Amino acid sequence: MSNKNVFLKKYFLMTRSEENYLKTIFHLGGGDSNSITTNAIAEQMETKPSSVTDMAKKLSEKGLVDYVRYQGVSLTDAGVKTALSIIRKHRLWEVFLVQKLDFTWDEVHEVAEQLEHIKSEKLIDKIDELLDFPKYDPHGDPIPTKDGKFQERDKKLLSEMPINSQGVCVGVKDSSVPFLKFLDKNNIALGNSIKVVDKEDFDHSLHILMNGKELRISHQIASNLYVKKND
Amino acid sequence: MSNKNVFLKKYFLMTRSEENYLKTIFHLGGGDSNSITTNAIAEQMETKPSSVTDMAKKLSEKGLVDYVRYQGVSLTDAGVKTALSIIRKHRLWEVFLVQKLDFTWDEVHEVAEQLEHIKSEKLIDKIDELLDFPKYDPHGDPIPTKDGKFQERDKKLLSEMPINSQGVCVGVKDSSVPFLKFLDKNNIALGNSIKVVDKEDFDHSLHILMNGKELRISHQIASNLYVKKND
DNA sequence: ATCTATTTTTAGATTTGTCTAAATTTAATT
DNA sequence: AATTAAATTTAGACAAATCTAAAAATAGAT
């Protein structure tokens, strides 16, 4: 193997496992020098803390995380950049699956978990182009740009909207399969218009108009739906 | 882990490596109880014969190949079926990359090698549908159907066509990147009409009309281009 | 401030897929 | 049929990623 490849292997080639750790650390808030505990990572990834420790050392060696024993790990700039590129791929594939292949939004995650690890810059750029450079994925989460920038949309939880306020459904907080299936079954989809008609003090349930149709929504649902408030 | 999953793991879940071995054995002609030597497989996969032996035992355990020590391996019916399903995925992804993402035919192989291992029946069926159920990949190779059937096209090498015969370019024998790039550069593509005007006895080069334009073709090129002869 | 309870790490083992080097089997040649 | 060359397998090692069980460090409660 040439020197060049040794360099490439050590600093650029990421295993699927390494990529998954970086992505998880990012999702747990490990950017901005924010330390995440090995326990938290292990729980999120359904693995053991000792395995996380091993990987923390490895990623630290590669300069992707800062790791201090007994303190946890945080992402370096390089680590954030890599995490964002994986999240970008994941979310672009989700849009592709929904828009081009008629997947439902509860089906996309599992397949995107695989597709996000495909190594080809041209591939993901062309998918981006085919989809006309979408800004949000099917759950309303923002898609990072190629250079790792992305902006959270100005949104709030439906449960926090005042009576008589209006808006558009733009995302979900809980993106688990059961919740997404529930929303599908009740015709609640991104883009739907929402008006809060009344709020029940007793159980915090809501009476809303969705696309003009009356609907009763429990607090549990309302506190997992994001709405972009109309001005 | 439940009993059901043990069953699934042992008999259905294929690792990427296992899938690559099955695919290679198939391409080397290991169907129809045809034994392929460990050496031949090792050479094709750029690995060592001892590694092939290890994998032969494993695949044999799973009932995907018949393996006799010092004799080689051949695919069982289950092995052929699995190999064809991987080849189907590979070729469908190749069509997708060329038709939907403007990849050139020399770029598709490497990416398809990764995409062929994505586990989702729905995904590949939807890609098939999106592409309108293509029968051939960008190199002219046939795409197996879902139930593992596929028919080789009636074709012959350009070098074997008699003078004055006509046909259409339908495939390549050598699908290496340099050859495909050469064809691109010289505007030789699948679907082009071909008429053999003259054959040179001295060096076996050909004088042909391709899409009506005169062209001189060396024997090396002509013996790697497949043509479907007109009746 | 000390003592627990919890968290985290270490040490050693396991699995998968690979390798090298040595041993074995097969095939080829005389 | 014996010998030699080539192919193939075995045995043992290694790297990656994981686990369990034991040891070490930290944090919380009194």
Image: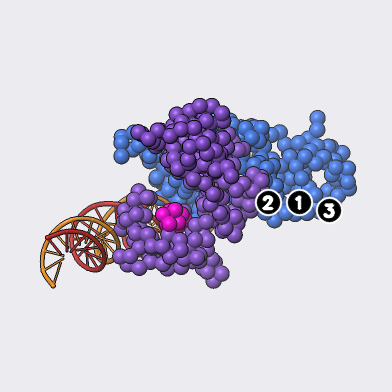
Chain colours: A blue, B purple, C red, D orange
Q: Earlier in the sequence, mark 1 or mark 3?
A: 1
Residue at the location (70% across, 56% down)? A178
Q: Quadrant of residue A131?
A: top right
Sort mark 2 into few (<14), some (14-19) or many (20+) by Cα contacts within 10 Å. Answer: many
Residue type indicated by callout 2? Asp
Percent position (x, y) of residue B228? 54, 43
Relative to A26, say whether B37 is above or below: below
Badge 2 element: loop
- State which region is magenta: B19-29
Q: Residue at x 78, y 47 (%)?
A: A188
Q: Front-most of A231 and B89? A: B89
Q: Are marks 1 and 3 on the same chain?
A: yes
Label 1 neighbour load within 10 Å: few <14, some 14-19, many 20+: some
Q: Report the chain holding disc 1.
A: A
Q: Secondary structure at mark 1?
A: helix
Whether A127 is drawn above or below B155: the answer is: above
Q: Nearer the viewer, mark 1 or mark 3?
A: 1
Identify the residue position indicated by label 2 in the image: A106
Q: Contact, CB < 8 Å: mark 1 with mark 2?
A: yes
Instruction: Give the main secondary structure of the magenta stretch.
Output: helix
Residue on which the image places disc 3: A202
Q: Is C22 positioned to the left or the right of A78 in the image?
A: left
In the image, is residue B136 part of the stretch drawn in magenta?
no
In the image as oriented, which residue stretches furthest toward the top? B214
